[in-house]
Image (cartoon, coloured by chain):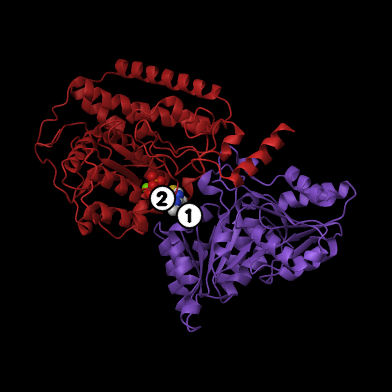
Chain colours: A purple, B red
């Protein structure tokens, strides 16, 4: 089995899907010769030509909006938004068109498309290369939202997203693009959208996270294990629809939930998960569910590291839960 | 100053040019500028070039995290800066305008502070390098999101009109920006309201790797103005005096209540898109080498030489003087140190609501322990 970084796994998924189905095409800024600014589409224009790997004008509205029309007409477009922070000029197309097409046509039309985007902070990117806008998408009915954290998941979930019949926002934590390598099968495999992964089984406390902060979450779990504790770690992978069943089963066992995310705290995925657990498991909780999150400020450059959920912050919150 | 006569025709098929490659003045009018002013253009272009070289050193030595080189844009940027009424008119720049804000008078220490993201940055290190701004000089702090500043420039110009302040809003952007919806929305509104704005495209024919042929099917950028009902000027942006005189006419036209214009300054991008880019992936070295032959500084140097206003000794002294000023400002900025981490929670709103107080307290406690 080959070992791959996250960005290589994405490249492989795109390549395989384009080979498998000639309706699959890529469009975005700099995806052609340049291979994308992070090289997700490297080599693909050479292989499939400029009609199937298309450099677009600099307009996210054109990219996402055209993807809606391409998809409605029978193509399987995968749109690349250069950074999640730059999706906003295309938001009207994503929210008003892509998300609601199936509903407003009573199921007659649909937009089976994927919108890929690098997300998250920790790369000294300042305001507009660091944000984690997944809650905006999750809050918009009609979109599925995936945030991956491993090369294996990236390949299996991207392939599944491309074959999915709904618009999927596929978010790739840019700080993980080249951070780790792991074995990823060279052949065709799909992972289920909406299913979390239990990264570690344990009985004392449930740590739930997704995307970039899975790194800090797993590190914190290791330290807890070294200190004689037994945490369970869940990677949501899909944040809309998120895997309630897996999270509830885990918290029912441990009685304690710590939700970790680098997105701003208020009205976040973390808020949603902790609220749901409070509603449904109130009488089985040993402590109130807690959140470790990003702050409710724009993402600052100078405090790039401070903004992120650190291992220290995760451990402090876990201690509060365990000492409750 | 009210514009006495109209010198330039919009929608020309060839770029407006006043100085040719050999440095000869080829315009049908006298420039009428005094020698010290002519030399000042050169000085500002040289300072812009040397700043660019300094920024490249800062990125190579790991002292900063990002730069967007402006080499090749100097004539355009200095032309714009000289046409504005400094500190009176407003500038809405974009990230490749470090040479422009320098020529406009943003202090070097602030420029380096912003580049270092440290306490010398008036914006408190909040944004990536190449995102300057200055309340004192009416420079609207740069936003990375391409073309997002066009409608705000229209709004400011509208306020200038409604409040009769005699100011003009000048808004710069790249060729790629003209594809964004916000670009069209802002320009259309400005024309409808005859707002005193000048929209300026620094057209280097690339948006990162994407050539202009994939950006627009229009003959040029200036021609787009026709559809919105404003004049569009197609200008050789490697010619500092063409850039200056056209900008000046457009600005004074706007100031006189005759509405907005679009000015396209055709330039070269000598560097990669940014320090995060490798342009050899998409642009041939031959193309780049040919462009470098058309250095805007060299063309203007030839012009000055023919006027008896340039010699190597003077230029060397100038270079030395600017380099010293750059180094001194850099050293001063380096001394400033890191910004206070708790400043992260300031300026989200005019006053901190309870939730930001809570979050700030958490970090303050963490920093103490
Ligand atoms: C809305 C938005 N989309 C994408 C980007 C990423 N991006 C940064 S610069 C750039 C190219 C801009 O090209 P152009 O407007 O020609 O200006 P130049 O850099 O050539 O001066 C792109 C796509 C962005 N900053 N904002
Ligand atoms: Mg450009």
Q: Is residue B109 left or right of residue B303?
A: right
Which residue: 34% across, 51% down?
B151
Which residue: 21% across, 28% down?
B303
Instruction: Indicate the position of residue A254 as horizontal and vertical percent values.
Output: 84, 61
Q: Is residue B334 visible?
A: yes
Q: Nearer the viewer, residue B76 or A310?
A: A310
Instruction: Indicate the position of residue B9 as horizontal and vertical percent values.
Output: 13, 47
User: What is the total number of numbered labels drawn onto the structure image?
Assistant: 2
What residue does disc 2 label? B146
Q: Nearer the viewer, residue B356 or A240?
A: B356
Which residue: 78% across, 63% down?
A198
SS for tag 2?
Answer: loop
Disc 2 to disc 1, C-alpha distance: 8 Å
Residue A297 tag number: none
Q: Are marks 2 and 1 in contact (CB under 8 Å)?
A: yes
SS for tag 1?
Answer: helix
Answer few, some or many: residues within 10 Å of disc 2's Cα (few below 14, many 20 plus, some between 14 and 19).
many
| Chain to which mark 2 belongs | B
Same-chain check, marks 2 and 1? no
What residue does disc 1 label? A86
Q: Is residue B360 left or right of residue A33?
A: right
Q: Is mark 1 within 8 Å of ligand 1?
A: yes
**Residue at the right extreme?**
A228
- Pick the quarter of the image with the N terminus of chain B: top left
């Amino acid at each position: 089995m080959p070992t791959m970084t996250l960005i290589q796994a994405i490249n492989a998924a795109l390549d395989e899907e384009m080979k498998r189905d000639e309706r699959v095409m890529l469009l975005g800024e700099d995806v052609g010769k340049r291979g994308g600014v992070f090289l997700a589409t490297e080599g693909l224009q050479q292989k499939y030509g400029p009609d199937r790997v298309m450099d677009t004008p600099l307009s996210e509205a054109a990219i996402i909006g055209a993807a809606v029309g391409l998809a409605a007409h029978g193509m399987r477009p995968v749109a690349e938004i250069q950074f999640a922070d730059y999706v906003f000029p295309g938001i009207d197309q994503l929210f008003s068109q892509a998300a609601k097409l199936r509903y407003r046509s009573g199921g007659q039309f649909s937009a089976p498309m994927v919108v890929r985007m690098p997300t998250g902070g920790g790369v000294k990117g300042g305001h507009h290369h660091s944000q984690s806008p997944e809650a905006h998408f999750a809050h918009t009915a009609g979109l599925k939202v995936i945030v991956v954290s491993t090369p294996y998941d990236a390949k299996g979930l991207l392939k599944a997203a491309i074959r999915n019949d709904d618009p999927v926002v596929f978010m790739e934590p840019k700080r993980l693009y080249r951070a780790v390598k792991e074995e990823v099968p060279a052949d065709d495999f799909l992972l289920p959208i909406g299913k979390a992964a239990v990264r570690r089984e344990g009985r004392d406390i449930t740590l739930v996270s997704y995307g970039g902060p899975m790194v800090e979450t797993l590190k914190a779990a290791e330290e807890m294990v070294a200190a004689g504790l037994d945490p369970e770690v869940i990677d949501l992978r899909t944040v809309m629809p998120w895997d309630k069943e897996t999270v509830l089963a885990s918290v029912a066992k441990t009685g304690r939930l710590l939700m970790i995310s680098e997105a701003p705290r208020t009205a976040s995925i973390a808020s949603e998960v902790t609220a749901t657990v409070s509603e449904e498991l109130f009488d089985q909780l040993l402590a109130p569910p807690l959140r470790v999150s990003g702050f409710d400020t724009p993402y600052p450059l100078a405090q790039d590291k401070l903004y992120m959920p650190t291992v220290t912050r995760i451990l402090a919150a876990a201690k509060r839960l365990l000492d409750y | 100053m009210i514009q006495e006569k109209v010198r330039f025709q919009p929608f020309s098929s060839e770029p407006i040019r006043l100085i040719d490659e050999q440095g000869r003045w080829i315009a049908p009018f006298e420039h009428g500028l005094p020698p010290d002013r002519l030399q000042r253009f050169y000085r500002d272009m040289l300072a812009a070039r040397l700043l660019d070289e300094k920024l490249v050193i800062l990125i190579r030595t790991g002292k900063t995290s990002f730069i967007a080189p402006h080499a090749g844009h100097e004539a355009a940027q200095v032309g714009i800066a000289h046409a504005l009424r400094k500190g009176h008119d407003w500038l809405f720049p974009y990230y490749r305008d470090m040479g422009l804000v320098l020529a406009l008078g943003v202090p070097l220490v602030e420029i380096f502070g912003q580049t270092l993201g440290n306490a010398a940055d008036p914006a408190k290190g909040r944004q990536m390098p190449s995102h300057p701004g200055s309340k004192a000089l009416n420079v609207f702090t740069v936003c990375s999101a391409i073309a997002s500043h066009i409608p705000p420039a229209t709004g400011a110009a509208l306020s200038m009109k409604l409040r009769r302040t005699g100011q003009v809003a000048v808004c710069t952007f790249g060729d790629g920006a003209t594809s964004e919806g916000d670009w069209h929305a802002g320009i259309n509104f400005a024309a409808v309201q005859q707002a005193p704005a000048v929209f300026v495209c620094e057209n280097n024919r690339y948006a990162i790797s994407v050539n202009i042929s994939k950006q627009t099917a229009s003959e040029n950028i200036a021609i787009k103005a026709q559809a919105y009902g404003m004049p569009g000027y197609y200008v050789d942006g490697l010619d500092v005096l063409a850039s200056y005189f056209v900008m000046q006419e457009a600005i004074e036209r706007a100031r006189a209540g005759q509405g907005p214009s679009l000015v396209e300054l055709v330039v070269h991008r000598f560097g990669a898109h940014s320090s995060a880019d490798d342009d050899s992936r998409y642009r041939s070295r031959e193309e780049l080498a040919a462009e470098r032959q058309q250095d805007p500084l060299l063309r203007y140097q030839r012009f000055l030489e023919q006027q008896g206003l340039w010699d190597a000794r003077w230029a060397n002294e100038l270079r030395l003087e600017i380099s010293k000023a750059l180094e001194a400002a850099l050293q001063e900025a380096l001394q400033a140190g890191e910004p206070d981490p708790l400043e992260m929670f300031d300026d989200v709103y005019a006053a901190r609501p309870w939730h930001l107080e809570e979050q700030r307290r958490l970090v303050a406690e963490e920093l103490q322990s």
